[in-house]
Amino acid sequence: MNVQFDDKGLVPAIIQDAGTKEVLTLAYMNEESLARTLETGETWFYSRSRQELWHKGATSGNTQTVVSINYDCDQDALLVLVYPKGPACHTGAVSCFSERIFKNPSSLEDYQILQSLEKVIQDREQERPEGAYTTYLFEKGVDKILKKVGEETAEVIIAAKNRDHEELRWEAADLLYHLQVLLVEQGLPFKRVLQTLEERHKDRS
């Protein structure tokens, strides 16, 4: 392993969600924390302020299972792909990079809305707030949810046949929402679907 540590024995590690590709945090590793990460399959870092090793999620339970670790062309920075169990940031945010100073108005957040939607649906399933449409779907059960997925699929097909982009946009959004409800009802995290897409892409590339 040819990782180049700096004069303090550290190397920066960019932590990225392997499913959503969202950058979660920037931390530092020394030789020992990197070795523990490789040994345990979960992220370990070195705290510059406390000057000690720390295991991500040791107290919060928000561990990060390592998928892969790459280093850059200069071998002095790491990219660590993980499957996070809970938020990465100590504030409770999914990512430490939640404060924005600039956004191109023509860009979209890379699928983060799907992740946010999944969280809302999961909360609705647990809390069942009265009057919420998502609560209604969960209370009616899987047959009702499946019926709605079928209906929205048909409406997407009709909109596409009509070449109506505005209608298609709305119907596709409805389909994605109801598909997310179905996945939550089935206990299948959306990132598992993204994993499958990623695996297929790798197999065909």
Image (tube, helix red, strand yellow):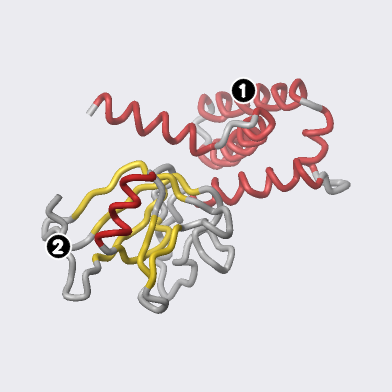
Whether label 1 touches label 2, CB < 8 Å: no
Give the Cα distance between marks 1 and 2.
55 Å
Q: Position of residue 27 (x, y in %)?
A: 36, 65
Question: Which of the two residues, 193 or 166, is positioned nearer the viewer here?
Answer: 193
Classify 36 as above or below 126. Answer: below
Q: From the viewer's perspective, is the residue at label 1 or at label 2 nearer?
A: 2
Kindly identify which numbered label has been placed on residue 71. Answer: none
> How many labels were placed on the picture?
2
User: Which residue sits at x=17%, y=71%?
Assistant: 6
Q: Which of 78 and 104 is in front in this view?
A: 78
What residue is shown with label 1?
154
Q: Position of residue 40 (x, y in %)?
A: 38, 45
Q: Nearer the viewer, residue 112 or 54?
A: 54
- Residue 32 on image: x %, y %: 29, 59
Find numbered disc 1 in the image and state the secondary structure of the residue it sits on: helix
User: Percent x, y for residue 60?
Assistant: 58, 58
Q: Which residue is drawn at 40% across and 79% down?
A: 49
Q: How crowded is mark 2: few (under 14 residues within 10 Å), some or many (20 or more)?
A: some
Tell me the residue that label 2 is attached to: 4
